[in-house]
Image: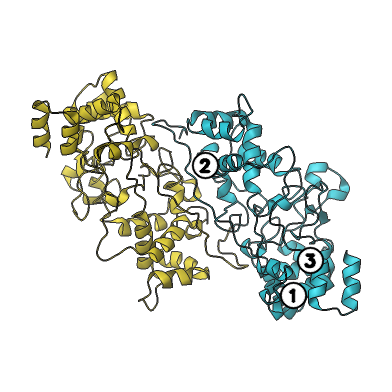
Chain colours: A cyan, B yellow
């Protein structure tokens, strides 16, 4: 695809034709795995679990604490604050449109949302539960949960188990998608949806080469059911000054999972969707503004010194990828009737 | 009113007649102070502010963190976890129906919801902002807030100020009321809304004397516009064993505000509304179950050893005070476009 679009650029086709070939609107629905179909009841349970802080050891941290769906789907911090005030070393990725990723976490260590949802619950510096059994015991002690699990998994004899819990959370997360951004409107034929600067920025990300990695409807590579992660080394061109300034060599990325030499400093390519909402940037949240993130990526990945105008145009374009959030009602968490669940 | 109702009890009137005289359904609307009328726009701004963790120093603690309106309006913990993992000494009171209290906080140190909302923002162990000016500067840096303040306070030339922020939060909180509980349905004439045990429990709280303090539609005393706090000494009859077990003498309550001898261990009478959702109990969250809370209150306040049957009946009655939550849409927090607000 990239070759074709560069060719078209050289032919000086209209920006519209270029966009149609290289860029794609976000689908209106997320890809759904066959073994976890979405139902209204499953989504409802998943939403409740997503918002329930009682699944954390202290009773204060829910999925939404670090992946806030009232905002950018993250926590707007460099690194999150988890159990006992501990901080991780990587920045919380946005949950928005995570359904369009082929692998989860910065290092791709999870193959899907179902598997991903298991991680934070028992991560000692995140939600801090001692085990999934302990987490499930918490859920079981809340009388109101039973009916939600039964409704979501009507064929199961004892539906309250961790697999069903993460399946429900994943089903809910597949509703957390944001088609309908200015960019999507443009792609669907409304040429007035993007202004001249935004269109210039769109052309720039392609001609400069950003879209070699950030491609596809989610600007993160192929979509599921493709299973391969879209991984890239970062930084590609390790300018020592910038690497030091933003502390970009310490974290070994995917190497920490695979222990393969070629995976050192390798990361899953993150989405550009709603990127304007998720400062600070990069795996360690070291860069505070979108302009600087664009400048640094140009230098470290493409060895290009972007001009100020180019940076401004690209940022204008990236802002067109902020999408509308689906309307959501506030869940009512199942009741604990006169009982204390969390020990102080 | 109490005298009348005891008189009626002696006359052995029907439970319905007793209930009509002593107990009252929760009004469908909260009392609204003249200087802060509720408007749709003000409520909307207040909701957004209530859910916005960016108003805390770390960017992780919102009003809703400790007063969770998806649950009991509190955090289901003995004491909350605030800035830097610090814990306070008092249990977060529920925000549900707090609009029906004449004074706010356990010690009544705030005269209304507007004043109350100022407190946690700058409390160093709660949201931890250095000052209201710093908090406001945060809000000002989020471009999307301006239009909400302008819509909520259309007559103000520069509406983004702390008084308007807390006025909006209070206006939102006045929507957080729960009329329509089984008890309310019963009071409005649906005699099937409460079962025999629940009605027995209702009679018991009156004959035993609980309603001497827990009276009125909110079971917390007079409603606004009354301005006097409904204060009571706790414990009244300091049984040494129980006081020690639950550490009930250490906190001096309202004395810490007034320094008056008669205010030692004096507290605002809390609501019974949704009390089944707000374990653990008492100002220090030391009692883990509603049964035990009822038993201890009987002993310490009324010098009565309640029987197990009485306790069960009273708890059954208290459960009828769990109300429906008003339907709420999830707010979308105003956007920070490519900027970092919270320093790590």
Q: Residue beneath label 2, please?
A: A53
Residues under numbered marks 2 and 3 in contact, where contact means CB atoms less than 8 Å apart: no
Q: Quadrant of the N terminus of chain A?
A: bottom right
- As helix, strand or loop, the secondary structure at mark 3 comes to loop
Q: Which label was assigned to residue B112?
A: none
Residue A23, disc: 3
Closer to the camera, A268 or B45? B45
Q: Please say whether residue B118 is visible from this viewpoint.
A: no
User: Which is more N-terminal, label 3 or label 2?
Assistant: 3
Residue A141 in the image: x percent, y percent? 50, 28
Picture layout, residue A182 above or below residue A86:
below
Q: Residue at x 30, y 27 (%)?
A: B195
Dot 1: what SS? helix
Which residue is label 1 attached to? Answer: A201
Front residue of A54/A224: it is A224
| Marks 1 & 2 on one chain | yes
Q: Nearer the viewer, mark 2 or mark 3?
A: 3
Q: Nearer the viewer, mark 3 or mark 1?
A: 3
Instruction: Confirm whether residue A260 shows in the render.
Output: yes
**Side of B294 relative to A103 (left or right):** left
Tell me the subunit letter for badge 2. Answer: A
What's the residue at 83%, 42% (across, down)? A259
């Amino acid at each position: 695809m990239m070759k074709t679009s560069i060719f078209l650029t050289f032919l000086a086709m209209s920006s519209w034709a270029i966009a149609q070939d290289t860029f794609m609107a976000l689908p209106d629905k997320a890809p759904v795995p066959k073994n976890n179909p979405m139902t209204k009841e499953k989504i409802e349970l998943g939403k409740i679990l997503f918002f329930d802080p009682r699944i954390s050891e202290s009773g204060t941290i829910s999925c939404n604490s670090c992946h806030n769906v009232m905002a950018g789907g993250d926590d707007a911090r460099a690194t999150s604050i988890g159990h006992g005030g501990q901080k991780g070393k990587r920045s919380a990725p946005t949950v928005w449109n995570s359904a369009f990723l082929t692998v989860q976490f910065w290092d791709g260590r999870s193959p899907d949302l179902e598997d991903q949802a298991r991680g934070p619950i028992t991560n000692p510096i995140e939600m801090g539960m001692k085990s999934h059994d302990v987490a499930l015991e918490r859920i079981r002690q809340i009388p109101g949960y039973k009916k939600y699990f039964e409704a979501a998994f009507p064929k199961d004899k004892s539906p309250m188990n961790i697999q069903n819990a993460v399946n429900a959370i994943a089903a809910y997360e597949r509703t957390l998608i944001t088609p309908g951004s200015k960019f999507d409107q443009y792609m669907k034929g409304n040429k007035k949806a993007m202004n001249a600067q935004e269109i210039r920025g769109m052309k720039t990300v392609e001609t400069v080469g950003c879209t070699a990695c950030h491609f596809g409807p989610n600007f993160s590579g192929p979509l599921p059911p493709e299973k391969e992660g879209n991984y890239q080394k970062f930084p590609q061109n390790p300018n020592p000054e910038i690497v030091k300034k933003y502390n970009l060599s310490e974290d070994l990325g995917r190497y920490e999972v695979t222990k393969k030499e070629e995976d050192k400093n390798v990361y899953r390519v993150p989405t550009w969707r709603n990127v304007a909402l998720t400062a600070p940037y990069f795996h360690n949240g070291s860069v505070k503004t979108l302009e600087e993130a664009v400048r640094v990526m140009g230098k470290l990945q493409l060895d290009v010194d972007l001009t100020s105008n180019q940076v401004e145009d690209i940022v204008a374009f990236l802002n067109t990828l902020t999408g509308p959030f689906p309307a959501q009602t506030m869940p009512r968490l199942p009741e604990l009737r006169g009982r204390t669940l969390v020990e102080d």
